[in-house]
Image (spheres, rainbow, N blue to C red):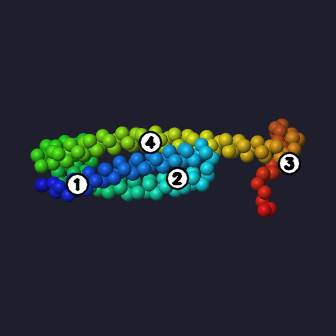
């Protein structure tokens, strides 16, 4: 069975678009990190919303790419579970698809590199956000401790606790 060139082209375009989105996602992660550094909550929120939109688009695009990959595997009479390497080898074995296979091989390598970079940037952002949350919690605890009397009492188990319940620093009246 012949592989229509338009299917191969759509597969190539899906990978190229995925690479583009991963680049945008990495920029969005960087924008969030920069907003954290500047304590700019509004910019952080906007960058987080942009990241969410990009992730949604990326998921849809990955589904589209996977569908085109399954279609190519069926056309080449490969198992649907065949690896990308097996798909590329089957495409390279056909004279009419060798050029597209070489293009796909290069794109696949770039995609793997971009995915690795994006994962690393995501891990950096995750660490930074967790650290910022921890600092925020410690500051709130410190502020609440300043607002409380220092008296402590013994409980029936022999432990100590605050004599009165802690009050929040948040002004709930207005």
Image location of residue 104, percent across then percent down: 24, 46
Examine the image and state in which quarter residue 116 appears.
Answer: top left
Pointer 2 residue: 47
Q: Residues within 10 Å of mark 3 (few under 14, many from 20)?
A: few
Picture layout, residue 127 above or below residue 25: above
* Horizontal side of residue 138 vs 37, given as left or right: right
Camera-side residue of 46 and 89:
46
Looking at the image, tell me whether mark 1 or mark 2 is earlier in sequence order: 1
Looking at the image, tell me whether mark 1 or mark 4 is earlier in sequence order: 1
Mark toward the viewer: 4 or 3: 4
Pointer 4 residue: 119
* Horizontal side of residue 7 vs 50, given as left or right: left
For the residues labelled 4 and 2, the Cα–Cα distance comes to 17 Å
Q: Quadrant of the C terminus?
A: bottom right
Answer whether labels 1 and 2 touch (C-beta < 8 Å): no
Q: Residue furthest top?
A: 158
Looking at the image, tell me whether mark 4 or mark 2 is earlier in sequence order: 2
Mark toward the viewer: 1 or 4: 1
Pointer 3 residue: 164
Image location of residue 14, percent across then percent down: 30, 53
Mark toward the viewer: 1 or 3: 1
Residue found 48% across the figure and 49% down from its top: 28
* Horizontal side of residue 7 vs 33, given as left or right: left
């Amino acid at each position: 069975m012949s592989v229509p060139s338009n299917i191969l082209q759509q597969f190539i375009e899906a990978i190229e678009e995925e690479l583009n989105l991963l680049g945008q996602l990495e920029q969005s992660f960087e924008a969030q990190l920069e907003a954290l550094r500047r304590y700019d909550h509004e910019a952080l929120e906007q960058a987080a919303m942009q990241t969410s939109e990009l992730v949604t688009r990326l998921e849809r695009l990955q589904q589209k790419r996977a569908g085109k990959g399954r279609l190519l595997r069926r056309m080449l009479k490969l198992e649907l579970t065949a690896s990308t390497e097996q798909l590329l080898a089957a495409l390279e074995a056909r004279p009419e698809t060798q050029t597209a296979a070489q293009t796909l091989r290069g794109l696949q390598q770039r995609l793997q590199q971009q995915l690795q970079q994006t994962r690393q940037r995501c891990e950096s952002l995750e660490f930074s956000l967790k650290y910022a949350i921890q600092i925020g919690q410690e500051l709130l605890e410190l502020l609440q401790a300043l607002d409380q009397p220092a008296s402590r009492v013994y409980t029936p188990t022999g432990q100590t606790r605050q004599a009165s319940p802690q009050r929040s620093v948040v002004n709930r009246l207005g």
